[in-house]
Image (cartoon, coloured by chain):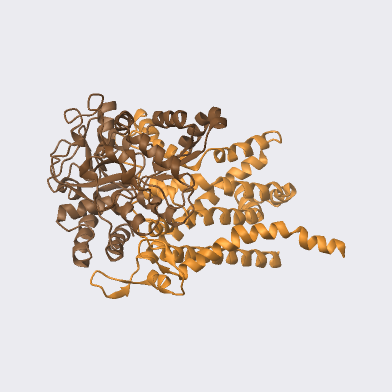
Chain colours: A orange, B brown
């Protein structure tokens, strides 16, 4: 009896932290998204779905309410970029994690440490480093010109490619670590068995190693995809701020746009998208477990 | 911003024991002379914390969110007006402060603080554009150069990452009044910016110095004093344009947010900053025009060596837009970057 009581109130601090730092803020964002906007920013409590309607319908230049694809376009672009980043991260993380897992025992901690090393430096500094690398007369351009390969490659900075490089670079450690964890647990005898059965290296990688490391890839995909949806720095600093992502759109609405409820409505939409993604992922994992 | 905070904190540590209180500043990044902060700390025995922001919108949002804990903030005129109207500012009877006697009469009783209750101005200047003379040799006498660029500037232009002053500049060029509530007029502003977009390398407000002085871009939307300082101090080959359609004006003032914890220290600091020798030091550090009396004998920048600060074209100050007008501004911006 006592033990059961302890189980209840022993968890109270955890519940309190969850309620205060997770549920309460989300609740506030939800309420703000249903409020009416204040004339100069801020908001008045209320119950209105105007902000959600605005995502789809807005007055055009002639003052007629019309379907506006612009916010859907921004949402779609964000999802596309996050997906692309996740795929590239997975493609790069698999061989990297495999190499680390195969490394001699005393090297492993060092290699893992190297993967986490960038996290010791502020995100802004790391993104700025890419400005120096990609910029006009930057490291890449200088190197290529030094080798006599090109004379003028034009600007690499302020392109969608630069933004993608920045996103992949920022989030790839979050993919490598879980993939490494699942590959390391992989039973070496399975690989041997595959070779014994005349499986080539490629077939072994595709039919044995890849499926067994999939749980790690899925965990990594969540860790990469979700923060990508809210990325603000890379689009501005590397992408040149020429096209908005959801993070920038939300920022604009709370800042210059002075429309907090609309900003909150987009934030809620983003949150719902993330939740759908996580739920699909969990569903897949459960199905996989059932089949396995 | 964090670095500034840390530096100030470290400087203040030895005398923290003697401090009679604190003063929390939230000002434009790198806008206040650190030597003056140290001097004030020594003189008043007050520990000063400095935090920085890069846009009026950031500041307004923070104050609206409530209980910021800041004692002095420095909004531009159009945001100051909104803050005062929204009851976000402390009435400090600014006209009764010693600092008020130092304010140039032309900046007293302005529309953003008619009764001089809330604010003492700190700096003023213009928003325009700067070109790198190594990469662009053409004329800079019109906004046309920036908004409808010829081949030599195409793809080599950078704008700021927020709409505030850019839309103002586009309005000056098109002859559309600031804060227009007419969608047809604002559609023209949108069309102009949308036609310019393919030639814009980036919309960004960070790291402008390196981008324009280093030649990453050849033209950059920028402010007078910042442009002047890197030409003056670092010999950057740049020129601040004087477009015949006019420049967008701004004036930043020191105000006290409602519920500030250290109002008396804030008033002390405002008086301190407005004393002639300190105002001169601040002018020499910040490089934007001083709206308070300064000692011309020790002022570093003059009409001869810093023409950027002495515009030869008309200057039109940004106004506080109505919600309807602001919605059109946001609409232009969102459609531009959709």
State left or right for residue A229 relative to residue B163: right
**Quarter that holds the N terminus of chain B:** top left
Q: Is residue B101 above or below residue A10?
A: above
Task: Look at 18% across and 63% down and name the residue there.
Answer: B185
The quadrant the C terminus of chain B occupies is bottom left
* Front one among A250 and B79: B79
Seen as rendered, the residue at the extreme top is B297
Q: Residue at x 55, y 61 (%)?
A: A25
**The one of A44 and B162 positioned closer to us in this rendering:** A44
Give the percent coordinates (x, y) of residue B236: 26, 29
Q: Is residue A121 above or below residue B191?
A: above
Is residue B113 shown left or right of residue B240? right
A107 displayed left or right of B283: right
Q: In this rendering, would B14 be left or right of A285?
A: left
For residue A113, what is the image quadrant? top right
Q: Is residue B97 visible?
A: yes
- Residue A63 pos. (x, y %): 25, 73
> x%, y% of residue A88?
50, 51
How far from the left and from the top, in percent, is residue B178?
Answer: 21, 57
């Amino acid at each position: 009896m006592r033990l059961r009581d302890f189980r209840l109130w022993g968890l109270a601090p955890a519940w309190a932290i969850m309620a205060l730092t997770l549920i309460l803020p989300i609740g506030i964002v939800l309420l703000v998204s249903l409020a009416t906007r204040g004339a100069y920013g801020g908001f008045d409590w209320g119950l209105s779905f105007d902000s959600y309607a605005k995502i789809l319908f807005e007055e055009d230049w002639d003052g007629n309410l019309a379907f506006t694809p612009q916010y859907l376009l921004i949402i779609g672009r964000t999802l596309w970029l996050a997906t692309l980043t996740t795929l590239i991260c997975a493609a790069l993380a698999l061989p990297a994690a495999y190499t680390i897992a195969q490394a001699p025992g005393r090297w492993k901690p060092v290699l893992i440490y190297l993967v986490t090393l960038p996290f010791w430096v502020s995100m802004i500094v790391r993104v700025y480093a890419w400005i120096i690398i990609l910029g006009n007369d930057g490291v890449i351009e200088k190197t290529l010109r030094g080798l006599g390969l090109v004379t003028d490659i034009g600007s690499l900075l302020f392109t969608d490619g630069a933004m993608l490089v920045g996103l992949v670079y920022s989030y790839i450690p979050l993919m490598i670590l879980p993939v490494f964890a699942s590959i390391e647990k992989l039973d070496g005898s399975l690989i041997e068995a595959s070779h014994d059965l005349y499986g080539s290296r490629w077939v072994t990688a595709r039919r044995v190693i890849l499926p067994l490391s999939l749980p790690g890839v899925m965990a990594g995909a969540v860790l990469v995809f979700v923060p990508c949806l809210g990325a603000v720095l890379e689009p501005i600093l590397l992408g040149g701020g020429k096209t908005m992502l959801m993070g920038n759109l939300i920022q604009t609405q709370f800042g210059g746009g002075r429309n907090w409820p609309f900003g909150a409505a987009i934030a809620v939409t983003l949150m719902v998208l993330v939740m759908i993604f996580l739920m699909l992922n969990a569903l897949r994992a459960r199905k996989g477990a059932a089949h396995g | 911003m964090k670095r500034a905070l840390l530096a100030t904190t470290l400087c203040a540590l030895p005398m923290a024991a003697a401090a009679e209180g604190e003063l929390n500043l939230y000002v434009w990044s790198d806008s206040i002379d650190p030597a003056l902060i140290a001097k004030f700390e020594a003189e008043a025995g007050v520990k000063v914390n400095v935090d920085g922001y890069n846009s009026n919108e950031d500041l307004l949002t923070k104050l609206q969110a409530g209980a910021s804990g800041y004692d002095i903030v420095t909004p531009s005129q159009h945001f100051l007006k909104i803050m005062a109207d929204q009851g976000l500012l402390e009435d400090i009877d600014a006209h009764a402060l010693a600092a008020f006697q130092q304010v140039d009469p032309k900046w007293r009783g302005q529309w953003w603080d008619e009764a001089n209750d809330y604010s003492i101005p700190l700096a003023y200047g213009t928003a325009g554009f700067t070109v790198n003379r190594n990469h662009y040799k053409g004329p800079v006498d019109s906004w046309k150069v920036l908004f409808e660029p010829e081949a030599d500037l195409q793809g080599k232009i950078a704008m700021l990452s927020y709409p505030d002053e850019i839309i103002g500049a586009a309005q000056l060029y098109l002859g559309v009044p600031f804060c227009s509530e007419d969608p047809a007029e604002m559609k023209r502003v949108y069309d102009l910016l949308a036609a310019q977009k393919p030639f814009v390398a980036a919309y960004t407000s960070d790291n402008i110095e390196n981008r324009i002085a280093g030649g990453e871009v050849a033209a950059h939307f920028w402010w007078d004093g910042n442009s002047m300082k890197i030409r003056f101090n670092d010999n950057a080959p740049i020129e601040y344009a004087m477009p015949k359609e006019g420049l967008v004006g701004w004036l930043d003032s020191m105000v006290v947010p409602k519920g500030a914890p250290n109002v008396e220290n804030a008033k002390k600091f405002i008086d301190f900053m407005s004393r002639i020798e300190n105002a001169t030091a601040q002018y020499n550090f910040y490089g934007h025009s001083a709206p308070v009396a300064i000692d011309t004998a020790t002022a570093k920048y003059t009409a001869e060596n810093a023409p950027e600060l002495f515009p030869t074209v008309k200057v039109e100050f940004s106004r506080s837009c109505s919600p309807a007008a602001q919605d059109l501004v946001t609409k232009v911006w969102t459609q531009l970057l959709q």
